[in-house]
Image: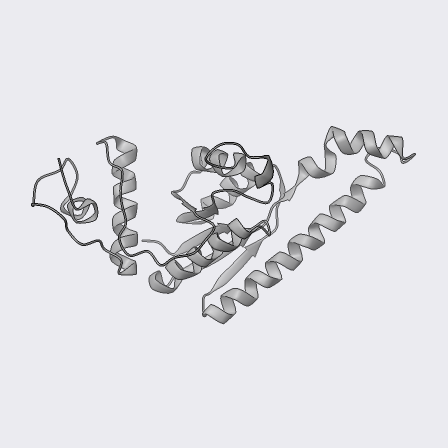
Amino acid sequence: MIRNILVALDGSQHADGALEFALWFANRLRARVIGAHVVDIVSIEGSFLHDVSGSLGFEPYLDFSSKMREALQERGTVLLDAFRARCEHAGVDCDTALPMGIVANEICDQARLADLVVVGHRGVNEQFSTGLLGSTTESVARKSPKPVLVTPIGFKEASRPLLAYDGSQRASAALNMAAQLSASSGCASKQQGPHCRCPGTDVGIRLLGVCE
């Protein structure tokens, strides 16, 4: 049962799309949405800032890093305030988290309090990404203790879910989550092709539509 949905927020358009998906599912599942923005400790205490503060005549990590921390925390507070307003407008119960640390690690830590994690496929630093997913999204998808839904930048209501199934234990877990989302949100796919038995469940047949 999905009662708590965690959505990662970084102020990017991708995160905004992830929030739209999270709110859409939350409305249909009657779930609570937890908005998490991570104050990136690498941006505060990285070697680059150490070098810059030294070149500007500041004592490293004393003045410059504290001001950077305050600025990033203030930015996070603004993002979470906007998140609360979006949830209130959508009629969805919400909570917030503003941890500090390595972004992917903190999201995975917050995921322990949720049943589903929603992240955009890229983030605020998308211009530096070269792969299919942003580095943080890929790290979260690999390390998260809970199921992860990676969303596109543009929101569109889910109507016909597609499941990639290879019979493995992880695929079976994905099948279970897809079935919950599909049944609870009313977006079960139409069946295509003949009825047949797959190495899963009847719900899996309805989701996949066609079996080989």
Q: Nearer the viewer, residue 82 or 35?
A: 82
Residue drawn at the location 77% of the way across and 44% of the way down: 68
Q: Picture coordinates of residue 120 (x, y %)?
A: 48, 46
Q: Picture coordinates of residue 117 (x, y %)?
A: 44, 47
Residue drawn at the location 44% of the way across and 37% of the way down: 141
- Tell me the quadrant of the picture where the C terminus can be found: top left
Q: Which of 159 and 141 is in front in this view?
A: 159
**How did the renderer colour the structure?**
one colour
In the rendered image of this protein, does residue 191 appear above or below residue 24? above
In the rendered image of this protein, does residue 169 appear above or below residue 85? above
Residue furthest right as drawn: 57
Residue 199 falls left or right of residue 164: left
Q: Nearer the viewer, residue 17 or 1?
A: 17
Residue 113 falls left or right of residue 84: left
In the rendered image of this protein, does residue 31 appear above or below residue 11? below
Q: Picture coordinates of residue 62 (x, y %)?
A: 84, 38
Residue drawn at the location 89% of the way across and 36% of the way down: 58
Residue 45 falls left or right of residue 91: right
Q: Can residue 117 be seen in this view?
A: yes
In the picture, residue 78 is in which quadrant? bottom right
Q: Is residue 8 visible?
A: no
In the picture, residue 210 is in which quadrant? top left
Q: Which of 18 and 106 is in front in this view?
A: 18
Residue drawn at the location 30% of the way across and 34% of the way down: 170
In the rendered image of this protein, does residue 50 appear above or below residue 87? above
